[in-house]
Amino acid sequence: MLFPPPKIGRRIIPESNQLTSLIPADLYYIQVAVPGPFQSALTYCHDRPVSPGIRVKVPLGSRKVVGIVTGHSEQANVEPGKLKPIETVLDSRPLLPEDILQLSTWMSRYYLHEFSSAFMLALPAALRKEQPAELPATEMVTLTVAGEAISHDQLQRAHKQQALLIQLQTQSPCPLSGLKEKGHSRATIQALEKKVCSA
């Protein structure tokens, strides 16, 4: 008994939906200046807006590189299948102000050099990598008005507190790390603080 050959169906997607169906509607198109022989910023996508002047970590071929956001676009200028997402937003606020971004864009176009060069040169060397932009907080110790008024003689029986008081009356404020290097422990600092408060 012969069976008819199976029918092979083909679903045709309307041309207007072929591009948009592959990209979620809530993505933002971000222009990023990345190191390489590019004459303009490359387009990446992200699930929220990213302000120009912020550093981002993005895929570039087989590598991960640090780039600088230069702006946004209403639509992608690459095929949907080739659009790559921003991997990490490195900064909480822009490192490059608007006027520096404009100057860097002008320089890149005027000198017809690698597009990202002017943007990268506007940053310190450490920030061209993934180094954090915020400096680590330094804990400082300082004397109050009451502390400055205390006499050394009031601490004759507390030699460590007396030495700490002399140090702070000579240099105040003083980094906590610097006091520890000179042998003043946190316990001594807290004891002197109580003495000042009770004076």
Image: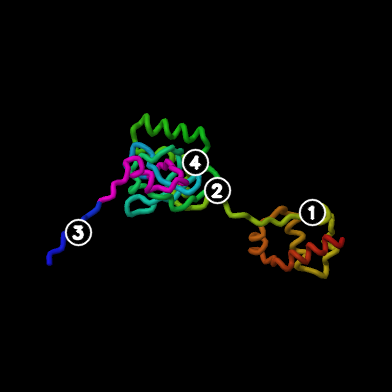
Rendered-image quadrant of the N terminus:
bottom left
Marks 3/2: CA–CA distance: 59 Å
Which residue type does callout 2 highlight? Ser
- Identified by mark 1, the residue type is Thr
Q: Earlier in the sequence, mark 1 or mark 3?
A: 3
Q: Upstream in the sequence, badge 3 or badge 2?
A: 3
Q: Please provide the residue range marked out in magenta.
A: 10-34
Q: Position of residue 4 (x, y in %)?
A: 16, 60
Q: What label does residue 92 carry, if any?
A: 2
Label placed on residue 6: 3
Q: Quadrant of the C terminus?
A: bottom right
Binning the other alpha carbons within 10 Å of mark 4 as few (below 14), some (14 to 19) or many (20 upward) gives many
Q: Is residue 125 visible?
A: no
Residue named by callout 4? 53
Residue 31 colored magenta?
A: yes
Q: Residue 172, how many percent across, how many down?
A: 72, 53
Give me the disc on residue 108: none
